[in-house]
Amino acid sequence: MPRMKTNLSTAPRADAPDATLAGRGALGDTAAFEILMRRHNRMLFRTARAILRDDAEAEDALQEAYLHAYEALMRLRRAAPPSCRCSPARRSTQLWIPT
């Protein structure tokens, strides 16, 4: 299988798969992480609002969840060996797990 290359000098595509965006996010690409946030925001907000029954509390909970997700990506980035950092799609199932 050919090795995948990630070019962070180009902007992430809005139609890129979640795994690609998460991989780029783990490499520090905040634009890719933002695309993921925007892509899933409506569903996550509706879920939080259904549980909390309050828009403001749901927004706060979602912001905290995004912060935890971003911090988890950064921990993976620091913990990953160089070979994994070069091929983020390999680790995609571990990268985007809302908490």
Image (spheres, rainbow, N blue to C red):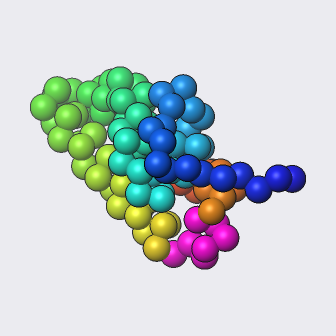
Q: Is residue 80 magenta?
A: yes
Against 47, residue 85 (above or below) is below
| In this view, 62 is above or below 71 | above
Which quarter of the figure has residue 31? top left
Outermost residue, front side: 9
Looking at the magenta stretch, what is its main secondary structure?
Answer: helix
Q: Residue lying farthest left?
A: 56
* Label tally: 0
Q: Where residue 48 sits in the image (x, y, percent)?
A: 30, 33
Instruction: Name the residue located 41 percent from the left edge and 34 percent from the top edge.
Output: 35
Q: Is residue 7 visible?
A: yes
Identify the residue shown where x is 13% and y is 31%: 56
Nearer to us in this view, 80 or 50: 80
Q: Nearer the viewer, residue 70 or 20?
A: 20
Name the side, left or right, on which 22 lies relative to 56. right
93 drawn magenta: no
Q: Report the span colored magenta.
A: 79-85
Give the camera-side residue of 39 and 97: 39
Q: In the rendering, at what x and y percent does residue 73 appear?
A: 44, 59
Residue 55 spot, x, y in % from top left: 17, 26
- Horizontal and vertical percent for residue 80? 56, 72
Answer whether residue 99 is visible to the viewer in this image: no
Q: Is residue 74 left or right of residue 66?
A: right
| Residue at x-position 59% and y-position 51% | 6
**Looking at the rendering, which quadrant does residue 82 occupy?**
bottom right
